[in-house]
């Protein structure tokens, strides 16, 4: 059996661990900085589509989703695997059985059906191990959340939490009731609402349970949860994100290999977005070089292609991003607000979608 030496702890980690491990969520609390992974062939086709996060952040609604779905319908040539991925913002973390009544008043099942009626496939983002302190989950099931003297933060920016960042607690995955609840959420998302893609995000969060002194237990928990989804719903396409790499081998269809290429909340904020997004582009280039053999284990997800000027990329950088993503020969998603893109300009620049 061929084995691959994969550098980095999780999806967003740089291929080479720096001396100063900041922000903390990028690095293993147990000192892991690479994995030796056996090849496990992926039998599914790689996919294409559009993701809501990069254009809108959490500020989504049904109208925005559908107006982009209309644009993407005939966008990719020779492909029956075109997805519309509804990212963060559709509910509070933990409340995975209900959607926002203000953003999506007709519900997820209705939106999923409309996407399918357009000849596209609906996808949905979840962070299954995260809990929003303001969620119904946190109010009804405080005993299901990891707690020492206080609830444990699952997104450590620094060794201490910073007040202006959102707090996200982590669920106790050793509690059978929590596992049963999450499985029932996946069942509703797939069987009732009809979603055909699930992006599983912030899967690294359970490793920050202070109870764990090694990665053995969270590795097992993560692998078993992802394997359950894959075996129970083999036709559903799964993407691991913010995901420790080793335990997900053979358990998801695609894996992110670098950090978000842009931050939607930095749009039009010059020069901050120019510096931030340039750093992300450089990280993608380096990570792709050292993780390209991921394709033997999962489809590579290098993150979305964006060309909007609001992100602060120069045209040279946009061209570079396009070449990096297409060279990965894996997942290809668009991230712009497509209603504001001049596709004739794309054709002039030879951005021919695969």
Image: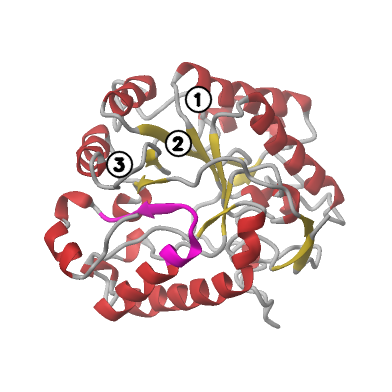
Q: Is residue 328 magenta?
A: yes
Q: Residues within 10 Å of mark 3 (few under 14, many from 20)?
A: some
Distance from disc 1 to disc 2, alpha carbons, whole Å, reads 8 Å
- Give the x, y percent position of residue 343: 16, 57
Residue receiving disc 1: 189
**Residue at left offset 38%, top offset 32%:** 121
Classify residue 68 by image quadrant.
top left
**Residue at left offset 17%, top offset 57%:** 341
Residue receiving disc 3: 60
- Image mark for residue 124: 2
Image quarter where the N terminus lies is bottom right
Q: Is residue 221 magenta?
A: no
Upstream in the sequence, badge 1 or badge 2?
A: 2
- Give the x, y percent position of residue 243: 64, 53
Upstream in the sequence, badge 1 or badge 3?
A: 3
Distance from disc 1 to disc 3, alpha carbons, whole Å, reads 18 Å
Q: Residues within 10 Å of mark 2 (few under 14, many from 20)?
A: many
Answer yes or no: is residue 4 visible: yes
Of marks 1 and 3, the one in the foreground? 1
Distance from disc 3 to disc 2, alpha carbons, whole Å, reads 13 Å
């Amino acid at each position: 059996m061929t084995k691959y030496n994969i550098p980095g702890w999780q999806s967003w980690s740089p291929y080479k661990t720096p001396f100063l491990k900041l922000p903390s969520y990028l690095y293993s609390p147990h000192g892991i900085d690479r994995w030796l992974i056996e090849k496990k062939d992926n039998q599914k086709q790689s996919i294409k589509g559009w993701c809501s996060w990069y254009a809108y952040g959490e500020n989504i609604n049904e109208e925005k989703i559908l107006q982009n779905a209309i644009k993407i319908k005939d966008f990719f040539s020779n492909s029956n695997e075109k997805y519309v991925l509804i990212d963060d913002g559709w509910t509070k973390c933990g409340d995975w059985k209900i959607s926002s009544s203000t953003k999506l008043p007709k519900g997820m099942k209705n939106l999923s059906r409309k996407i399918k009626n357009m000849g596209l496939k609906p996808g949905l983002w979840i962070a299954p191990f995260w809990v929003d302190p303001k969620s119904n989950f946190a109010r009804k099931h405080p005993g299901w959340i990891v707690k020492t003297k206080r609830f444990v933060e699952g997104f450590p920016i620094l060794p201490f939490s910073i007040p202006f960042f959102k707090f996200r607690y982590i669920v106790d995955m050793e509690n059978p009731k929590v596992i049963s609840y999450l499985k029932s959420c996946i069942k509703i998302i797939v069987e009732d609402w009809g979603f055909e893609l699930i992006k599983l995000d912030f899967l690294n969060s359970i490793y920050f349970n202070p109870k764990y002194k090694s990665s053995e237990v969270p590795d097992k928990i993560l692998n078993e949860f992802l394997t359950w989804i894959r075996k129970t719903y083999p036709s559903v396409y799964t993407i691991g994100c913010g995901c420790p790499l080793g335990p997900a081998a053979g358990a998801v269809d695609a894996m992110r290999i670098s950090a978000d290429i842009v931050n939607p909340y930095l749009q039009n904020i010059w020069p901050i977005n120019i510096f931030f997004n340039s750093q992300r582009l450089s990280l993608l280039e380096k990570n792709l070089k050292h993780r390209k053999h991921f394709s033997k284990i999962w489809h590579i997800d290098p993150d979305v292609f964006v060309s909007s000027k609001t992100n602060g990329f120069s045209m040279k950088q946009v061209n570079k991003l396009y070449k990096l993503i297409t060279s990965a020969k894996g997942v290809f998603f668009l991230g712009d607000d497509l209603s504001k893109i001049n596709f004739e300009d794309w054709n002039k620049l030879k951005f021919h979608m695969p």
